[in-house]
Amino acid sequence: MIPITGRLIRAAGLDALELRLQDRRATWLWATLVVALVARTVVAVVFTDFDPATANLWEYGEIAQATVEHGHGWIVAPISMKSSHLADPSFVYPTAYEAPLLIWGLIGLFLLFGVSKLALAVMTAFNVLMGTAIVYYSIRVARALFASEVIALLVGIIMALHPVFVFSVATYHAVNFYIPLLLIAFDLTLSTRRPTYALSVLVGLLAGIAALLRTEYLVLIGAIILGSLITHRQWKMTAVAAFAACVLIAPWTARNYMVLHRFIPVSTEVWEVLFVGDNPEANGDGKSVVDSGAYERLLGPELSAVPLDRNYEIAVNDVYRKAVIEYMKSHPLRSFVVLPIYKAALFWIYDIYHPVTHKLLYQLQFWPLFVLSVVGFGMAARSGCFAQPDHRTVLVLFAFQTLVMMSFAVAPRYRMNVEPFLYAYAAFGAVGIWGSLRRRLLISKPAGSTSS
């Protein structure tokens, strides 16, 4: 246990509990994971829509379904996915709109089981298992940062029952697949591990897989690799990791060039999400701009004029790119100063625009954990934790996540990228607050008094 954590645990009167948890590490770990698995299973059974006709499959599922039904060996998207174009509602076009890995997985399920309730049930089962893996690796993150079983247990309880993470398994989003990869990458690059070429290759492959699930994860895992480089300063190891990531992504990039005739490393979605975050009606939040009909008001004629041919996605992408560049040139102060500040505030403090954040269940979990995270982060900074390598890596990750958010637009779901790390600091803060309250109670207790 690191000295600052040891002092906090003793001040909080939790040293005996710390020892018991050390002795029974496997017991409490398995108990926490069982709770996490049961909670996610119940939510999945009760709240998941397994009917392909009504379920929200996100773009991943829409592309997978269109590919199985109309792709003829090519990954294609339906015109209905992003357009109300009425000329030919059955039109499909070659796509690289989303990172492809989850799409490939769904295509495999649809080929095996058809576009059916069974296919979606299997997808949900994977969601539940990967969601439980997030809990496990969040515990490992907390233990690595603070070397305390008490703090690791607190993080495990938070993550096992956290409503946002629990209810995420009732969706068909990729969130439960890419977050574990970020946590595993952090675990593999801890300062306590000796860097090797084999480990560097593994981390690079994780970065590549994560990028093929969610484009910006190449940046986020890149931040973790950079944090590790700052510690071990072995450039060759970092170069090996970068090369491994590029090798894994390269076939998809080559496919995109062959099919779409553009250099697209992973996804064409970049310019659209840039537009959502940088336009005359932008407020920093993504959903409010999309739901308000800003696309139609600002770019309706240009988007409707795009011809329905195999170049459709690239032509639409060019519309977004032109709009973003023109807006940034004509409004540089708002684009590069005002909106980024809004986005950082919405991400790190509270997204006042998104309807999910207005729900009571979200509020009940958010504010206590937010306050504890701020307190714990401040305590960690004051006690010198950020002079330690792994805490510095967390800072680098937070900085890169902030840059990503300042570039695009915010949604509460994106906080899930950093919350497993934030909640380690929240648990640290909770122990510190309890220790402070305990000292005050002991000081105010009359001399010579005894407790029954």
Image: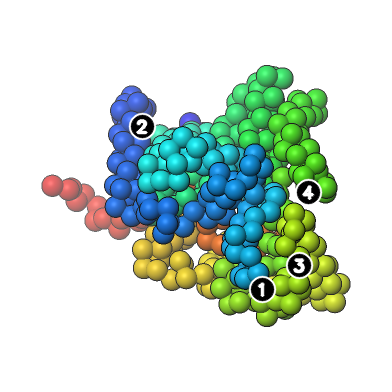
Disc 2 marks a residue whose amino acid type is Leu
Of 174 and 110, which appears nearest the observer? 110
Amino acid on which disc 4 is placed: Leu
Viewer-proximal residue, 10 or 52? 52
In front: label 1 or label 4: 4
* Residue bearing mark 4: 260
Q: Position of residue 297 (x, y in %)?
A: 68, 80
Between disc 1 and disc 2, whose residue precedes? 2
- Residue marked by disc 1: 295
Q: Nearer the viewer, mark 2 or mark 3?
A: 3
Q: Which residue is labeled 2 in the image? A: 29
Identify the secondary structure beneath mark 4. helix
Q: Nearer the viewer, mark 1 or mark 3?
A: 3
Distance, label 2 to label 3, CA atoms, is: 55 Å
**In terms of sequence position, does the residue under pointer 2 or pointer 3 come before the other?**
2
x%, y% of residue 88? Answer: 63, 65
Q: Secondary structure at mark 3?
A: loop
Q: Nearer the viewer, residue 217 or 294?
A: 294
Q: Give the residue pinned by disc 3.
A: 306
